[in-house]
């Protein structure tokens, strides 16, 4: 999968993860892109370790599920970190 395809996958996976998780997550499209790309990398790494499946093809269902799952994990961690910093600032 090429670099541009990986960025598109990350952006879409991050947006889907934001739609799945309840509540308001901060950040615009750039934060969504970053969290989605990091989540796709995390999902691919976990998929390679546990299921021997990676992010091989853009149109593969396993690629999308791993990317979205990784983006959800990263978004949860980001929400915990951002929530702590907001509560300290108040």
Image: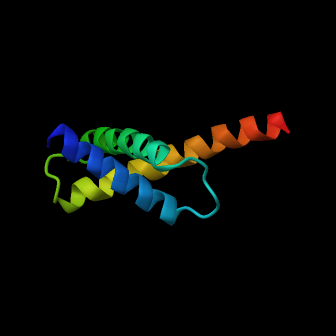
Q: In the picture provided, is 2 more to the left or to the right than 31?
A: left
Q: Is residue 54 visible?
A: no
Residue occupying the point 81% across, 34% down: 88
Residue occupying the point 60% across, 53% down: 25
- Using the rendered view, name the quadrant where residue 35 is placed: top left
Q: Quadrant of the N terminus?
A: top left
Q: How is the image coloured?
A: rainbow
* Residue 87 placement (x, y as % from top left): 80, 40
Q: Is residue 13 visible?
A: yes
* Residue 54 placement (x, y as % from top left): 21, 44
Q: In the picture provided, is 77 more to the left or to the right than 55?
A: right
Q: Is residue 39 above or below residue 63?
A: above
Residue occupying the point 36% across, 50% down: 11
Q: In the picture provided, is 67 more to the left or to the right than 32?
A: left
- Using the rendered view, name the quadrant where residue 86 is placed: top right
- Using the rendered view, name the quadrant where residue 24 is placed: bottom right
Q: Quadrant of the C terminus?
A: top right
Q: Nearer the viewer, residue 7 or 40?
A: 7
* Residue 32 placement (x, y as % from top left): 46, 48
* Residue 60 placement (x, y as % from top left): 17, 59
Farthest residue to the right: give it. 90
Q: Nearer the viewer, residue 74 or 32?
A: 32
Q: Nearer the viewer, residue 58 or 33?
A: 33
Numbered circles on residues, count: 0
């Amino acid at each position: 999968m090429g670099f541009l395809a990986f960025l598109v996958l990350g952006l879409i996976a991050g947006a889907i993860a934001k739609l799945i998780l309840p509540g308001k997550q901060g950040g615009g499209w750039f934060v969504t892109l970053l969290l989605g790309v990091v989540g796709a990398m995390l999902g691919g790494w976990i998929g390679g370790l546990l299921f021997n499946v990676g992010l091989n093809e853009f149109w593969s269902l396993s690629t999308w599920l791993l990317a979205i799952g990784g983006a959800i994990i990263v978004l949860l961690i980001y929400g915990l970190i951002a929530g702590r910093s907001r509560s300290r600032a108040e």
